[in-house]
Amino acid sequence: MNIRNVLNEKLINLNLQAKTKDEVLNELCHMLYDNGCISDVDTFLKDVYLRENEGETGLGSYIAIPHGKSDAVMKTSIAIGKTPHDIAWESLDDLPVRFIILFAVRMVDKSTVHIKLLAHVSELLADDDLLDQLLNIKSKKELLNLFENIEED
């Protein structure tokens, strides 16, 4: 499964208003809920925080990939948010984040799809040029095209 299968324009917000990690997760979860990807914001958020308690999801370079496996997830999806503000986040390089990729994974998909998606995104984010492009992305279409071009390579 590639990223394009779980991402669409309605699940991207390049101007998050959030100023805290909690606000970021809440905004992204509501986006997932509003688009029929999760059935309950509170249940999914609880599962995301359970994962957050296991270890940092900030990869470094201003990027975080929080994720939750939950019975509240109806469709495995990715919500993406970008903020002009530095958001305090537990990260590998102790830097704040500005670009967040939230994975919502159905319990039935948890063993295979979840691992493959995380591995794929982590591999993509190891590319410094891609990181720079993500942090400077201006439109949803530009972001979708970027992921589409990566998938074709």
Image (cartoon, rainbow, N blue to C red):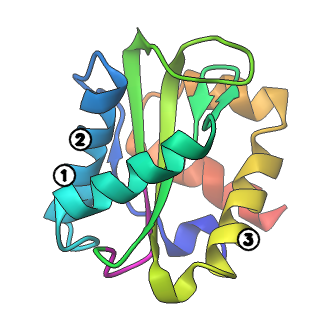
Residue depicted at x 31% and y 81% = 74
| Residue 78 painted magenta | yes
Marks 2 and 1 in Cβ contact (< 8 Å): yes
Q: Which mark is residue 44?
A: none
Which residue is located at x 51 percent, y 30 percent?
99
Q: Quadrant of the C terminus?
A: bottom right
Q: Amino acid at mark 3?
A: Lys
The residue tagged with tag 2: helix, strand or loop?
helix
Q: Earlier in the sequence, mark 1 or mark 3?
A: 1
Q: Is residue 47 above or below residue 124?
A: below
**Structural crowding at the residue carrying mark 1, measured as other residues with C-alpha within 10 Å and reported as few (<14), some (14–19) or many (≥20):** some
Query: Looking at the picture, how far across and down is residue 148, in whole percent?
Result: 64, 60
Alpha-carbon neighbours of circle 3 within 10 Å: few (<14), some, or many (≥20)?
some
Dividing the picture into quarters, in which one does residue 20 lie?
top left
What residue is disc 3 on?
116
Q: Which mark is residue 30?
A: 1
In three-dimensional space, the C-alpha distance between marks 2 and 3, rounded to whole angstroms, equals 25 Å
Q: Which mark is residue 26?
A: 2
Determine the secondary structure under disc 3.
helix
In space, the residues marked 2 and 1 are separated at their CA atoms by 6 Å
Q: Is residue 151 a member of the stretch shown in magenta?
A: no
Amino acid type, label 2: Asn
Which residue is at the far bottom? 108
The answer to whether the residue labelled 2 contacts the one labelled 3, judged by CB atoms less than 8 Å apart, is no
